[in-house]
Amino acid sequence: MFRFSLAQALLKENRGAEALPHLQLCAGKKSDWMIPRILLGKTLLQLGRRSEARPWLELALALAIEQSHEDPERELRALLKEI
């Protein structure tokens, strides 16, 4: 949880590139944790790394559907449509 909190703090400071390894670690630790995947995808998009963002956003979308999170599902579908 510390690494996730650190990643969030870095993102708030517009230090997305520094947050990426922490988000990747969090996503790798828990296969059903949707939020790190969403943040990874969004951060990669902001960094102009669209092709890297897509798989993370798709994984997050699958989790949103599986876990019945309607708002994230809508947001992720919209983001994926833009890529």
Image: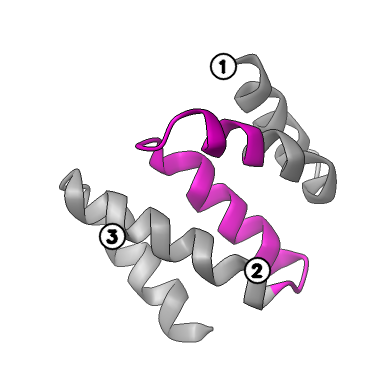
Q: Which residues are magenta?
A: 24-49
| Distance between mark 2 and mark 1 Cα atoms | 24 Å
Which amino acid type is marked by label 1? Answer: Met
Q: Earlier in the sequence, mark 3 or mark 2?
A: 2
Mark 2 element type? helix
What residue did someone put label 2 on? 52
Q: Quadrant of residue 19?
A: top right
Q: Quadrant of residue 31?
A: top left
What residue did someone put label 3 on? 73
Q: Earlier in the sequence, mark 2 or mark 1?
A: 1
Which residue does the image show at 39% across and 54% down from the upper left?
60
| Distance between mark 1 and mark 3 Cα atoms | 23 Å
Q: Is residue 67 above or below residue 78?
A: above
Left or right, 29 with reference to 9: left
Q: Residue 22: x, y in percent?
A: 71, 33
Circle number at residue 1: 1
Q: Is residue 72 above or below residue 83?
A: above
Q: Residues within 10 Å of mark 3 (few under 14, many from 20)?
A: some
Q: Nearer the viewer, mark 3 or mark 2?
A: 2
Q: Earlier in the sequence, mark 1 or mark 3?
A: 1
Mark 1 element type? loop
Q: Is residue 47 above or below residue 78?
A: above
| Distance between mark 3 and mark 2 Cα atoms | 19 Å
State whether the magenta stretch is mostly helix, strand or loop. Answer: helix
Q: Nearer the viewer, mark 1 or mark 3?
A: 1
Q: Residue 76: x, y in percent?
A: 38, 65
User: Which image quadrant: the N terminus?
Assistant: top right
Q: Residues within 10 Å of mark 1 (few under 14, many from 20)?
A: few
Depth check: give the residue in front, 50 or 5. 50
Which residue does the image show at 15% across and 47% down from the upper left?
68
Left or right, 43 with reference to 57: right
